[in-house]
Amino acid sequence: MTYQYLNGENWRHIYIVGDLHGCLRLLQDRLETVRFDAKQDLLISVGDLIDRGPDSPGCVALLTQPWFRSVRGNHEEMAMNALSKGNHQQWIGNGGDWFYKLEGMKMIEAKHALSRCRLMPLIIHLQLKNRLIVVAHADYPAARYEWEAPVDPFDVVWSRARIERIQQGKGEPISGADDFYFGHTPLPNALHAFNQHFIDTGAVFGNQLTLEQVQ
């Protein structure tokens, strides 16, 4: 699935969270702070639920929760490639070693949870009352956003070209939507430029976990 449509009218409050990388406890603490209500509210992740942090199984299990949505990150992509194509070394080298340390039922459960990564969209289209928000892991690789327009899946989950242009003072807005939320590139603080928000603040490296309320 490339695009997933969400209508904001179905929830009270909506939050977008940066890359989790197994930091489930940190997420639970942040949700508690904002009094997140799983019956009324929605949490959207910019992807990279797994690897490097203390609880990858717990984070990938969030995909079963009705109050949680996530786009696919490059770490989910690496996990899928390892499990379906045998490309284990790339995943292990980027923090996927946690999976290979599991035994018995824990490994079976993790495999089952990771199989859900195939259902993760590359792009979430969030229609709010007065604005349109687009969520992707690394980039929306086009000058203009269009619902269901073809995009390069590799660029959506891996590309750093757009954020590098912004950091060099050469950025530009993306037309077709009001706001774009991305993760992928760890930063000391969230970067807001034009209509783009880069919210991976490196929680797994000891920094804060960024949680932004959009409704």
Image (cartoon, grey):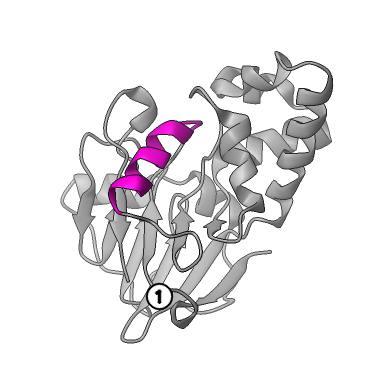
Image quadrant of residue 205? top left
How far from the left and from the top, in percent, is residue 61? 64, 42
Number of numbered labels in the structure image: 1
Residue at 68% in and 47% down? 117
Q: Amino acid at mark 1?
A: Arg
Is 149 in the magenta? no
Instruction: Count residues near mark 1 (Cα–Cα under 10 Å), then give few for <14, some for 14-19, many for 20+.
Output: few
How far from the left and from the top, in percent, is residue 95? 56, 22
96, above or below 39, in the image: above
- The magenta stretch spans which residues? 21-34
95, above or below 62, in the image: above
Element under disc 1: loop
**Secondary structure, magenta segment, majority class:** helix
Image quadrant of residue 132? bottom left
Residue at 71% in and 56% down? 119
131, above or below 162, in the image: below
Instruction: Between residue 181 and residue 11, name the one nearer to us.
Output: 11
Quarter of the image for the C terminus: give it. bottom left
Image quadrant of residue 111? top right
Report which residue position mark 1 lands on: 144
154 left or right, relative to 83: left
Residue at 59% in and 34% down? 58
Q: Is residue 128 visible?
A: yes
94 left or right, relative to 134: right
Residue at 40% in and 75% down? 144
Q: Residue furthest bottom?
A: 130
How far from the left and from the top, in percent, is residue 77? 64, 41
How far from the left and from the top, in percent, is residue 190? 23, 46
